[in-house]
Amino acid sequence: MTKRWALVSVFYKDGVLDFCRKLAEAGYGILSTGGTAKHLLEAGLPVTMVEEYTGFPEMMDGRVKTLHPRIHGGLLGIRDDAGHMASMEEHGIRQIDVVVVNLYPFQETIAKPDCTFAEAIEKIDIGGPSMLRSAAKNHKYVLPVIDPADYSWLGDALSSGRAITESERIGLAAKVFRVTSEYDAAISAYLARATSGEGGETGQAASGSATGSTAGLTVVSADSAADAEIRLFGTRYTLRQSLRYGENPHQGAAFYAADNASPATLGGAKQLQGKELSYNNIQDADAALSILRGLDSFGCACVAVKHMNPCGVGLGETADEAFARAYEADPVSIFGGIIAFNRPVGADVAAKLTDMFLEIVMAPAFSDEALALFAKKKNVRLLVIDVNEPIWHPGDQLVKRVSGGLLVQEVNFSPATQWQVVTKRQPTPEEYKAMEFGWSIVKYVKSNAIVLATANMTLGIGAGQMNRVGAATIALEQAGDKASMGVLASDAFFPMRDTVDTAAAAGVKAIVQPGGSIKDKDSIAACDEHGIAMVFTGVRHFLH
């Protein structure tokens, strides 16, 4: 009863032999079923058949084999619970410490043009997800292994006697729930299509349908558009709004909100008044929120956004003062833009905002007096969002769909680095403050990106240019005579000294940039020639 056991039952057998050899070396007995047991036995590995252990034969063409108390009791029993252990002892239940399972190929099966509905149903795995979920729930004691990519490191760790860390156990469990969630979502989408008659006998989606499934993304259309949902990496998104169109009038579009969306997000925001949000409104609003969340440590802030780039950002003691600086930064581009505050909006600033044409105003709250003023501008969309609550955490992922696949990356959290002064001239304390502010803004400007800023407002922003000196020229021209008051922040290194020379000609005295170019020495020399202080951050902020 004290021997360690691993249960191995896999559809995809690549790599499983080597992994099981390592398990055997580590002293694990192997329980297995059907084709997997045959594969292991033929390779000379000792295997105990599950039906031999449970005393209950496989039946119904293999549909029933592991759904048994002696299996799930061994997976779910809490080792530190005396009552659980007594029950296991009483009923002859072995502790199963490793579960190696991958699932029937449902997605691959339904992707075949000639797949019938009956064939699809037979490829719905029941026992596999059940064992994996049991093991994942009890991951403190049981290692759930669904991904063959984990065979190598885990086998090495177990055969060497290394303890598996809590973080590694949680990681294995998280992978199980993600994969099984995507698996269930694919089944749900397939059955929804079949129910709506879109696929006939084969269950394939008809053309023009808003349904489909790909790599963790599943779109389900039920009887009405209001019932549509998307599942992405285990999170369900429900249709919140059918949009008039997308980026352009000929493009259809919709807005889906996560079921667990918090009030700190656009998906959970409360709209107080105004027209329905458009596709471009939502994109711009999200860009404004991203910038604003990076400014909480600076105090009261106002961000103006146009076409997903900031056109003006200001700081102040009050929302009114912060807005005045954001407006002064670019009074032309702010027209028809989106304004976001990280502090409540009162009547003083509302009076100024209602004198302008704006698409959206966002803030954590609006005073009653401010709301009365906005009520006279019924088309202005007012959104209440707790912009000071963080919505991203290290390790969170962003997803972008490309032709034939998905790009997935971690959210851009700046790693801890030590800023390094690389020039003869040291920045002044005021220049350091301006650098920190400018660096917080340039992170959210489309690359190539240059931001010219003081310690409390942007002076000029150059976004999305094909070369860095072009972006600098735009930012400096926008700043005009004020350029000499600010510092220049660049989202990436300078490939040559021309940006420094351009900034020097406009009177700029301090620059912050990542560094890392093979020609850094040329830029440093140029700064020293012009009496400019330059700081390397050691990290870049590309935003394509």
Image: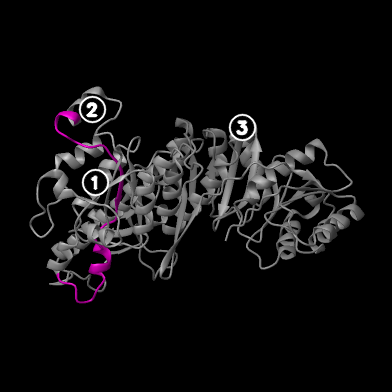
Of residues 521 and 5, the one nearer the viewer is: 5
Picture coordinates of residue 60, whole percent (x, y)? 7, 57
* Residue density around tag 3, few if under 14, some if 14–19, many if 20 or more, within 10 Å: some
First in sequence: mark 1 vs mark 3:
1
Q: Is residue 209 left or right of residue 309?
A: left
Picture coordinates of residue 242, whole percent (x, y)? 32, 57
Q: Which label was assigned to residue 131?
A: 1
Q: Residue most toward the right?
A: 529
Displayed quadrant of residue 246: bottom left
Mark 1: which amino acid? Met
Q: Which label was assigned to residue 509?
A: none
Does any portion of residue 276 appear in the rendered image?
Answer: no
Q: Is residue 188 left or right of residue 20?
A: left
Q: Which residues are magenta?
A: 89-116
Mark 3: which amino acid? Thr
Displayed quadrant of residue 207: bottom left
Quick check: is 181 in the magenta stretch? Answer: no
Query: Label 2 belongs to which residue?
Result: 85
The residues bearing labels 3 and 2 have C-alpha atoms spaced at a distance of 63 Å
Query: Label 3 belongs to which residue?
Result: 318
Give the label, 1 or 3, closer to the camera: 1
The N terminus - image quarter? top left
Quick check: is 111 in the magenta stretch? Answer: yes
* Residue density around tag 1, few if under 14, some if 14–19, many if 20 or more, within 10 Å: many
First in sequence: mark 3 vs mark 2:
2
Does any portion of residue 77 appear in the rendered image?
Answer: yes
SS assignment at label 3 = loop
The C terminus - image quarter? bottom right
Picture coordinates of residue 498, whole percent (x, y)? 81, 64
